[in-house]
Image (cartoon, coloured by chain):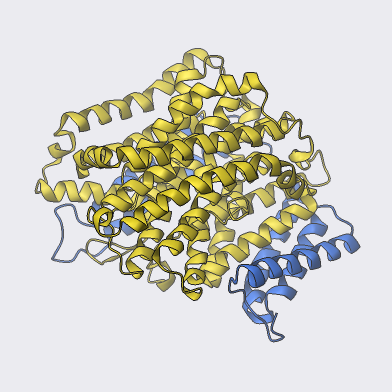
Amino acid sequence: MIGALPGLGPTNGVAILIPLAFTLGLPATPALILLTSVYYGAMYGGRISSILLNIPGDEPALMTTLDGYPMTKKGQAGEALALSGIASFVGAFFATWGLVFLAPQLVKIALLFGPAEYFALFTLAFATLGGIASKNQAKAAIAAAIGIGIAMIGVDHQTGVPRLTFGEIHLYEGISFLVAIVGLFAISEVLLFLEHAKGKAPEAAGTKLGRITVPWPMLKKTSGTMARSTVVGFLAGVLPGAGASLGSFIAYTIEKRVSDKDGTFGKGDPRGVAAPEAGNNAAAGGALVPMLALGVPGSGTTAVLLAMLMALNITPGPLLFTQHPDVVWGLIAALFIGNIMLLLLNVPMVGLFVRVLQVPSKYLMPAVAMISFVGIYGISGSTFDLLLMIIFGVVGYILRKLDVPMVPIILGILLGNEMEKSLRRALTISDGDVSILWGSPLAITIWALAILGFIAPMLIGRFLKPRPKKDASVSS
Amino acid sequence: MSDRILGGACLLLAVFYIFFATKIQVGFMSDPMGPKAFPVLIGVILAIAGIYPLVRPDPEPEWPGFGRLMEIVFAVAVMVGYTYALPEIGFTVSTAVAAGLLSWRLGASPVKAAIAGILIAVTIFVLFRMVLKLSLALGPWGF
């Protein structure tokens, strides 16, 4: 339920439950199991409102909106939900096996990445965003620049100098991506609904469900997608700092490049639902690898988990596996059990979730707005954050009308600081010599992919796709 | 036209951003790049990207008419009012009023909207305050 409710993603879910875990006086293993179960559960739940309402329940579920919501519009909401449940299970289940078997090897690969390679990797992420998020690369670049620009607000981590805060004390810690995501998605969605209310409203798109099972041909068609996306998502999760958002994003992008022969992606292609769901759940498992083995969190949620472990006097790192094997293996066993329970709960309960979200929009939208306020207020208790969220909502409404994609803004806010940190670290190592950025074959490869990723959609778009004009503004 | 305005706004924003980024104070203990360079770089990228819609705008989106626009302004005003009311008169009452008003403007009849507002407020209170123990703003009456 935490994942399904817009604005309450895994990070908040885990953050909210940390005090609970302490009040209950749980020992390390059960406390960690409680929190990771919420983490996995919320990763499953995020897709529900993505598919039914076009509002991602959490940030890794952003990509699921691209094909999930169009499937709902086509009356295939039930199929999309069931398929995404299965894809989530496949991703999470095999990622947990990956955690068991590949952890030491993958840690070695992650160690090959220096700051220069990370900077190239972030650039790759932003460069390829344009191809999937919008038909217009310039608008995707605008969105990414706005996102990264927002991330710069706050105290600089390296020098402690406040940047672009205009002396406003609330801005010293920067703008929380949660405030931005809830504003840009939930609040702007309410405003879009208002614009159409009583008119030719896209009233409660979730009314036509279709069947709540996955037809065999669809499962067969998406099995390759799930396999590829699980591997890709898992690898993305293992890279420290990347996490589930990048996992679902890269899984979707690669799947689009591999399978989208007829241009059906973005119009309700089941593979476009299976890919990000398998990818983000695999990444959630992958993100635990560096967190447990190196003490480097792979995502926002694993950072919260890391803080929790430290609070329990357990220092994650290579020694964790020898000093606290009960914690590590207890956790892994819990992940397997949790996954199977989530699958068992999810597929039969799809009908229930749908009924909950099938409430007419004139009642649902106010509830979405209010839950957004509660989610943000519950975390920060700050009126300032609520006002900021409303501003993001209004800006999001205008940008959505103008077909400027939201995803790069969020990713910019999320990854901007890490991107800058990598660049500055690289330049510190080289004492200001920029050639370090393309100083290794690995970095050169990533740069080449980034340039290709940015240019390719423009060329392909120009030769193959005439721009569908109306669709873009509605579906973005 | 809308895209031209977007492009122009991006250019203006970029100029302001770069201006304020250059005002960032750099301590004497700093890395070779310092805290200024990256924000300036982002401003430059924003400016370059902003030129494109200025020169080659997309077709005009469908903007709402005056009446609809007023609905949106009203909804934003309700949300801002709610933000200030929340710590003062407490979660339940302010949420019931705000949710009811939004529901009404989204097309529910006044009576149904009022019922929806109260139901939304009570449900969220029970779920988040009583089940999840989330701290919601308590007003002078304790709810």
Q: Which of A258/B71 is in front?
A: A258
For image coordinates 54% across by 73% down, the residue present is A381
Instruction: Work out whether residue B119 can be spotted.
Output: yes
Q: Position of residue A465 (x, y in %)?
A: 54, 17
Q: Which tint was used for chain B?
A: blue
Q: Where is residue A428 shown, x and y percent of the image?
A: 13, 51
Residue B36 versus residue A8: which sits nearer the camera? A8
User: Chain A, which colour?
Assistant: yellow
Q: Residue at x 74, y 50 (%)?
A: A356
Is A106 left, or right, of B6 in this rendering?
left
Image coords of residue B93 (percent x, y): 74, 75
In the displayed structure, would residue B52 be above or below residue B132?
above
Residue A215, located in which quarter of the rendered image?
Answer: top right
Q: Is residue A131 left or right of residue B42?
A: right
Q: How many badges with numbers are in the image?
A: 0
Residue found farthest to the left: A431
Depth check: give the residue in front, A238 or A34: A34
Q: Quadrant of the N terminus of chain A?
A: bottom right
- In the image, residue A271 sits, relative to residue A169, either above or below, namely above
- Asked if residue A405 shows in the view, the reply is no
Name the quadrant containing residue A144: top left
Residue A466: x and y, percent?
Answer: 56, 17
Q: Residue at 35% across / 63% down in the picture?
A: A309
Residue farthest along the front direction in this orientation: A326
Query: Toward which corner of the image does residue A119 lie, by quadrant?
Result: top left
Q: Nearer the viewer, residue B25 or A222?
A: A222
Against A19, residue A355 (above or below) is above
Q: Quadrant of the C terminus of chain A?
A: top right
At horizontal 46% and vertical 48% (from top left) the residue drawn is A335
Q: Is residue A140 above or below residue B105?
A: above
Left or right of residue A466: residue B72: right
